[in-house]
Amino acid sequence: MTFRLAFTEDPEAFLKEAAEFLAADPVVSTVVSSVTQRIARDGLEPEHPQWWVTVQDTEDRVVGVAMRTAPFVPHPMFVLPMPEDAARAIADAIVERGEDVTAVNGALPAARVLIDTLAEQSGGEVEVHTQMRLHVLGDLVVPPAPPGRLRAATSADAQRCLDWYRVFDDEASEQAGGRHGHGGEHVEPAFIDGKIERGEIWLWEDESGEVVHLTGHNPPSFGVARIGPVLTPKPHRRRGYASAAVAQVSRALRDAGAEVCLYTDQANATSNKVYAAIGYVAVVDQANFVITRPGPA
């Protein structure tokens, strides 16, 4: 089948073009829709690659979308479900654009097909960096709360929240027994300030008033809110803070009318068990791929 590809650097134009496709499965589309809406809202000029692509079939129906907006090296693409030939067409177009994409995240098999095609054309070997799993909230089970309370972060918590957001990926990767994550140096103070102002970061205080846990979330996009990051520093783990906080934040989001989802690393048995216990059900498996190339001899 022949596909028509449309690249754009305008997030609002992309949302207009892809709205029906994104709304058809808003849980699976959560990353693309929420990230794009945030970029459109903030209107910042990026210092890294930032574009979107829609794929249309011969009847002008959008059958797939992808984006490259990640602010961290190697600036991976994110791919939603699409026909395998559509994924190959995107890879071909990227090569024609002269763009060196060495990482692709997202839905299977589309993400794998896309990066395999890129590797075939540009050289290198494909490795699986992380295997992810998307979950949606089913019947919520709120566990008994540990001592302390959940509260919204305030401006006085901004530095702590910034520090924890910046270490989250490495902490999560270590907990899953994997390699280091991409790091969080790209997280800016203004980003944290905005999330605090909008009530999108929650903290658990223990009985002494010490902050021992953070749960963040994105605002609803096409009716779906995504939980994350979820971070309990090492000294405070295995005390039920994550279970209680995620359950309470999930309940608040659902009560406000949103469907709620979250991601886990498939290698992190602890987080997968915790979220299943409070009612999260696996929806789809995804993966993060990278192309590795031999260095100079």
Image (spheres, rainbow, N blue to C red):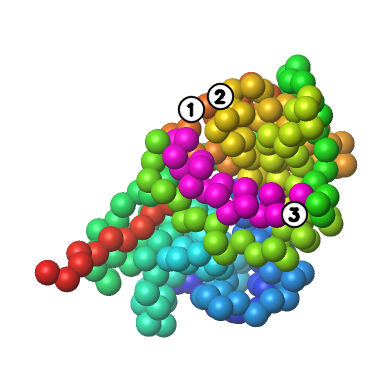
**Which of the marked residues, 1 or 3, is nearer the chain's N terminus?**
3
Q: Main secondary structure of the magenta part?
A: helix
120 with respect to 176 (left or right): left
Q: Residues within 10 Å of mark 1 (few under 14, many from 20)?
A: few
Query: Quick one: SS at disc 1?
Result: helix
| Residue 248 in sight in this render | no
Residue 273 - label: 2
Query: Which amino acid type is marked by label 2?
Result: Lys
Kindly identify the residue that appears in the image at 54 percent across and 38 percent down: 264
Q: Which mark is residue 256?
A: none
Task: Give the residue at mark 1.
Answer: 269
- Looking at marks 3 and 2 on the same chain, the residue that comes earlier in the sequence is marked by 3
Stretch of the chain drawn in magenta: 157-176
Crowdedness of circle 3 by 10 Å Cα count: few (<14), some, many (20+)?
some
| Residue visible at 43% across and 56% down in the picture | 111
Residue 131 placement, left or right of 14: left
Q: Which mark is residue 158?
A: 3
Task: Kindly identify the amino acid type of the residue bearing the numbered disc 3.
Answer: Ala
